[in-house]
């Protein structure tokens, strides 16, 4: 698309070399890609540079990494994306339609959730995430977040939390300033396959409940295993 708005795409990483090539290959070469690394030992930062990304160093902790990336972003629109989440083909045109909508700059957007696994458990989890989003307007970070820099700053941006940084920001945005894009992004099912589909989902729910009750995020992060 000629004259499309430039994005700053911010990706936090920690030993994500196996996932980065697919993610970076899905992005538009005209956009600014900022990889914020939290101390990888797998060669991921060098790989990201070789694929054209700007690489910044940060202490580990996704909230801090996302905040660091936002501080360096130069475009008007920012897309925060996990290192194991790949937007579907055509995603950039869908994003452009949101950007160009009359209320686009006043609304943050996120992708539909999809997993890269053919199992019944994966499809069930996708349906549960869709229900959570519909009922509570609560997307997680693995659905990405597209936001204008002015709206990001108005709500205070990402706080430097070790966990729940995505929920924290989404709650401050509120339902009226969130919308789901009509396209999916596919996330690796590795965490669920390794931790157990039911156990990992239950752990996520427990962490959300503890955060809602005001439990300090370092304690939740230790429970989560981060």
Image: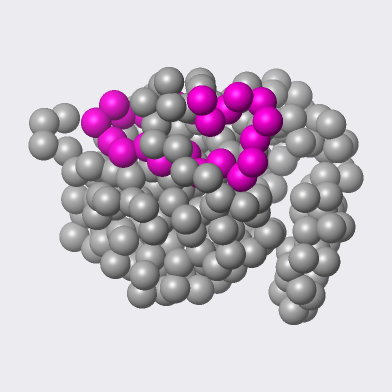
Tell me which residue sits at (24%, 54%) in the image: 76
Q: Which residues are magenta?
A: 22-46
The spot of residue 61 in percent (x, y) is 65, 54
The answer to whether any part of residue 182 appears in the image is: no
**Residue nearest the observer in this picture, 168 or 12:** 12
The spot of residue 84 in percent (x, y) is 59, 33
The spot of residue 181 in percent (x, y) is 40, 46
Q: Is residue 97 left or right of residue 11?
A: left
Tell me which residue sits at (43%, 62%) in the image: 178
Tell me which residue sits at (74%, 64%) in the image: 208
**Residue nearest the observer in this picture, 24 or 3:** 24
Q: Is residue 4 left or right of residue 132?
A: left
**Residue nearest the observer in this picture, 46 or 188:** 46
For the N terminus, the image quarter is: top left
Q: Is residue 200 above or below residue 166?
A: above
The spot of residue 79 in percent (x, y) is 39, 47
Q: Residue furthest bottom?
A: 214
Q: Is residue 1 left or right of residue 218?
A: left
Q: Is residue 211 left or right of residue 158?
A: right
**Residue nearest the observer in this picture, 142 or 217:** 217
Colour style of the rendered protein structure? one colour
Residue 92, by quadrant, is: top left
- Magenta region includes residue 36: yes
The answer to whether any part of residue 16 appears in the image is: yes
Q: Is residue 71 above or below residue 197?
A: below
Q: Is residue 67 above or below residue 156?
A: above
- Magenta region includes residue 113: no
């Amino acid at each position: 698309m000629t004259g499309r708005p430039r994005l700053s795409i911010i990706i936090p990483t920690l030993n994500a070399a196996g996932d980065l090539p697919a993610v970076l290959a899905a992005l538009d070469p005209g956009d600014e890609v900022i990889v914020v690394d939290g101390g990888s030992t797998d060669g991921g930062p060098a790989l990201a540079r070789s694929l054209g990304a700007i690489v910044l160093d940060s202490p580990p902790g996704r909230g801090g990494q996302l905040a660091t990336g936002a501080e360096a972003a130069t475009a008007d629109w920012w897309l925060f994306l996990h290192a194991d989440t790949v937007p579907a083909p055509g995603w950039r045109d869908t994003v452009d339609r949101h950007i160009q909508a009359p209320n686009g700059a006043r609304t943050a957007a996120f992708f539909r959730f999809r997993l890269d696994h053919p199992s019944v458990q994966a499809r069930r989890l996708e349906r549960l995430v869709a229900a959570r989003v519909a009922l509570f307007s609560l997307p997680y970070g693995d659905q990405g977040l597209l936001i204008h820099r002015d709206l990001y700053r108005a709500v205070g941006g990402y706080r430097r939390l070790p966990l729940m940084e995505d929920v924290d920001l989404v709650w401050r945005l509120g339902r009226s300033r969130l919308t789901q894009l009509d396209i999916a992004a596919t996330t690796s099912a590795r965490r669920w396959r390794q931790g157990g589909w039911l156990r990992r989902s239950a752990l996520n729910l427990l962490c959300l409940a503890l955060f809602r009750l005001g439990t300090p995020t370092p304690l939740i992060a230790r429970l989560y295993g981060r």
